[in-house]
Image (cartoon, grey):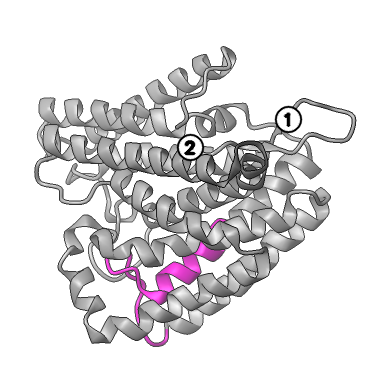
């Protein structure tokens, strides 16, 4: 994963982590783990699962928040890495990281999830590499490019792109054709992060809240023409959930930097998201191998929460020892 540290303050050589970003990513993991484990249990109510077609549930916000945090992380590390290592090494680092994510996802499909055709880690690798090239733009042109990217998707949707997305409907994220829409989260967030990284907490709250309001309004306007659809990454879904991710960031900044109330467990989850994703995936596969899909609701909920508790415990142990797995 990209680094998650703010630039050193004058007179200090030590980088300080942006804890609000750790909290944002941690909240995504906190919801992601039980949602993914519970997905196959029929007794778990629909509001806790991804909407099967049109609609929006709590589970449908996880990917946008995670990709939004990915873009914020990139905004903190890109310029520093370019200055330190140069363009060629920076690109090779990004390429190797994204390729590793893609390979991990492919191995997961080949070894465990044979019914799947496009895994989340593959999506992160493809989206991360595609979004990387937008980092060369300054923040405002990057925001404009993110908007044009979405506009291009909507222009091409009735010309064949929509049919290609529908062909990968069962992946839940439009398969590889969803890369363009999903990259909007990372690209727009990286522009926002670059604008905020040297500013005071109050500015960060206002900037992220302003983006949240604009995107959410855009999503509601688009909702008049097309329904929310995570599977097809409809414009209404992308804009509205992007606004929700930015709004959640504003709350994390307010909570952590203004009110100064720590969220130690959430922060720990956000500092090892890749490892926790892999861990909960393995535990989920084992749980579903031992239990039938139609177990009772108490067993389904208990299993999901038990795996979440185990992931939280691992996250705390690693955080206490300052062990962070990143690519």
Give the structural element (helix, strand or loop) at label 2: loop
Kindly identify which residue carries mark 2: 1
At x 41%, y 38%, the residue is 97
User: Which quarter of the rendered picture does the C terminus lie within?
Assistant: top left
> Residue 110: which disc?
none
Above-or-below relation of 300 to 154: above
Above-or-below relation of 149 to 73: below
241 is within the stretch colored magenta: yes
Q: Do we see residue 70 in this rendering? A: yes
Q: Nearer the viewer, residue 125 or 254?
A: 125
- With 275 as the anchor, is 175 left or right in this view? left
Q: Position of residue 151 (x, y in %)?
A: 44, 81
Q: Where is residue 99 in the image (x, y as percent from the top left)?
A: 33, 41
Q: Give the residues in magenta.
A: 224-246
- With 31 as the anchor, is 46 left or right in this view? left
CB under 8 Å between discs 2 and 1 = no
Mark 1: give few (<14), some (14-19) or many (20+) Cα within 10 Å: few
Kindly identify which residue carries mark 1: 15
At x 35%, y 61%, the residue is 179
Give the structural element (helix, strand or loop) at label 1: loop
- With 52 as the anchor, is 132 left or right in this view? right
The quadrant holding residue 231 is bottom left
Q: Do we see residue 246 in this rendering? A: no
At x 45%, y 56%, the residue is 64
């Amino acid at each position: 994963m990209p680094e998650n540290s703010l630039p050193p303050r004058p007179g200090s050589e030590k980088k300080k982590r942006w804890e609000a970003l750790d909290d944002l990513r941690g909240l995504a993991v906190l919801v992601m783990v039980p949602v993914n484990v519970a997905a196959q249990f029929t007794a778990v109510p629909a509001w806790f699962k991804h909407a099967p077609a049109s609609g929006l549930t709590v589970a449908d916000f996880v990917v946008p928040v995670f990709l939004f945090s990915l873009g914020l992380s990139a905004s903190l590390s890109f310029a520093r890495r370019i200055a330190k290592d140069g363009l060629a090494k920076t690109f090779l680092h990004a390429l190797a990281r994204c390729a590793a994510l893609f390979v991990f996802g492919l191995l997961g499909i080949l070894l465990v999830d044979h019914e799947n055709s496009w895994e989340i880690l593959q999506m992160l690798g493809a989206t991360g590499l595609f979004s990387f090239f937008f980092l060369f733009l300054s923040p405002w042109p990057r925001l404009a490019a993110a908007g044009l990217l979405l506009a291009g998707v909507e222009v091409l949707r009735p010309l064949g792109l929509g049919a290609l997305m529908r062909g990968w409907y069962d992946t839940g994220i439009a398969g590889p054709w969803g890369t363009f829409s999903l990259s909007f989260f990372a690209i727009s967030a990286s522009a926002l992060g670059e604008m905020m990284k040297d500013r005071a907490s109050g500015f960060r709250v206002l900037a992220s809240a302003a983006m949240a309001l604009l995107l959410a309004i855009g999503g509601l306007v688009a909702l008049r023409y097309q329904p929310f659809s995570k599977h097809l990454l409809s414009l209404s879904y992308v804009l509205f959930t992007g606004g929700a991710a930015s709004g959640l960031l504003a709350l994390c900044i307010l909570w952590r930097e203004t009110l100064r109330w720590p969220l130690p467990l959430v922060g720990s989850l956000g500092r090892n998201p890749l490892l926790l994703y892999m861990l909960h995936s393995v535990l989920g596969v084992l749980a579903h191998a031992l239990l039938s899909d139609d177990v009772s609701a108490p067993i389904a909920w208990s299993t999901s929460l038990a795996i979440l508790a185990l992931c939280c415990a691992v996250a705390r142990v690693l955080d206490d020892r300052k062990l962070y797995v990143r690519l």
